[in-house]
Image (spheres, helix red, strand yellow):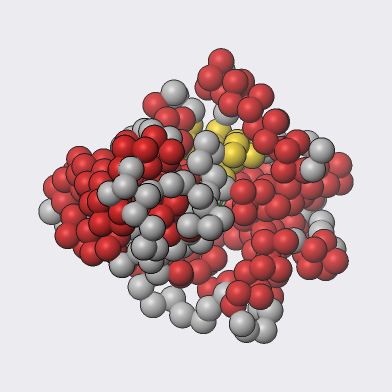
Amino acid sequence: MDSFTTTAQRSTEVAAAVAAHPGRFRVLTGERPTGALHLGHYFGTIRERVRLQRAGVETFLVLADYQVITDRDTTANVRDNVYGAVLDYLAAGIDPERTTIFTHSSIPALNQLLLPFLSLVTEAELHRNPTVKSEFEASGRALSGLLLTYPVHQAADILFCKGNLVPVGKDNLPHVEMTRVIARRFNERYGAIFPVPDALITATPEVPGLDGRKMSKSYGNAISLSMTADETVAAIRRTRTDPDRRITFDPERRPGVSALLTTAGLCLDEAPEEVADRIGDGGSSALKAVTATAVNEFLSPLRERRRELATDDELVQSVLARGNEHARAIADTTLAEVREAMGTVY
Ligand code: TRP
């Protein structure tokens, strides 16, 4: 059995435990504010976070602003992206009374945990991380120290609040694995302080973008939550399909057609094959029309709420101020425990 299968199985057991005892879990998850949140985020993780929050699980969401500069040298737009993400979260049903939304650059004690944590991993282990390797290759740049060590930073994101459950997509599993290693090693060396967190792989780990590749801001194949209905129609129209009028679900040979079917299926809560059968011989234009309508109808309540929330100039600022204050208090307590355990209190 490969490690993904093992983790997926464990993830199913964990999901059952969460349903039975929501109060035993503390969720920490989040994302890099590198652009607008899109349908991939929504079906991949946001929907799951709202579900966990509603089930009564205490939830922390990090907007990982230092992770923006792991593979690029600009922080341009970070602030706009952070603000946009907060609006997307709130519009999707994240309740700031129950979920702590914070930016990790605002939490000094969280970042200080990076130093003892770095001492617990070897350079070889860092170089072996498959996600770091592929991000490094995709960046086309020299490997920065921050890119190499960001999974350790991510361990600090998770462990500062003693998060024990981390809902993530497949590409973040190596980081949760590294967090588990760091928690175990810290506890062995200095005394039991940290939980060993579990990953929770979400039901739709990968949503295809409009070209059939993974949906990603950087591929320009994403439908963002904040697009207007017209922009959504235009983005879907641009999808490369093929002249075969018979619409079939065949991700290998028909990536564009199949990505549209998957997208429509997710929004309609139907299998992509069912959507294909309904369109039959209607060709690409019918497929695109069905998909655009499905997406726009699905997102319409969220977009409506988002528009209303955006009229309140102070809202995002106050949500972040409160979230950061709460996260800072927790990080200070954890760092104090860590320093006590390490014997570095003077
Ligand atoms: N690396 C995650 C992403 O690519 C974002 C992230 C930062 C994160 N810190 C985290 C996810 C801690 C889970 C837990 O989206």
Q: Position of residue 342 (x, y in %)?
A: 79, 50
- Which quadrant does the N terminus fall into? top right
Identify the residue shown where x is 25% and y is 57%: 285
Name above or below for residue 293 compared with residue 81.
Answer: above
Q: Position of residue 157 (x, y in %)?
A: 58, 52
Indicate the quadrant where residue 54 lies.
top left
The residue lying toward the viewer, choosing from 58 and 261, is 261
The reply to whether residue 266 is in sight is: no
- Which quadrant does the C terminus fall into? bottom right
Name above or below for residue 321 compared with residue 266.
Answer: below
Q: Position of residue 319 (x, y in %)?
A: 31, 48
- Left or right, 178 with respect to 16, comes to right
The residue lying toward the viewer, choosing from 152 and 136, is 136
The residue lying toward the viewer, choosing from 76 and 288, is 288
- Ligand 1's quadrant is bottom right
- Left or right, 61 with respect to 334, comes to left
The reply to whether residue 200 is in sight is: yes
The residue lying toward the viewer, choosing from 313 and 262, is 262
Name above or below for residue 151 compared with residue 293.
Answer: below
Identify the residue shown where x is 46% and y is 70%: 218
Furthest-top residue in view? 20
Identify the residue shown where x is 44% and y is 63%: 211
Q: Position of residue 97 (x, y in %)?
A: 33, 35
Indicate the quadrant where residue 76 lies.
bottom left
Name above or below for residue 260 compared with residue 161.
Answer: below
Identify the residue shown where x is 68% and y is 79%: 143
Give the number of marks: 0
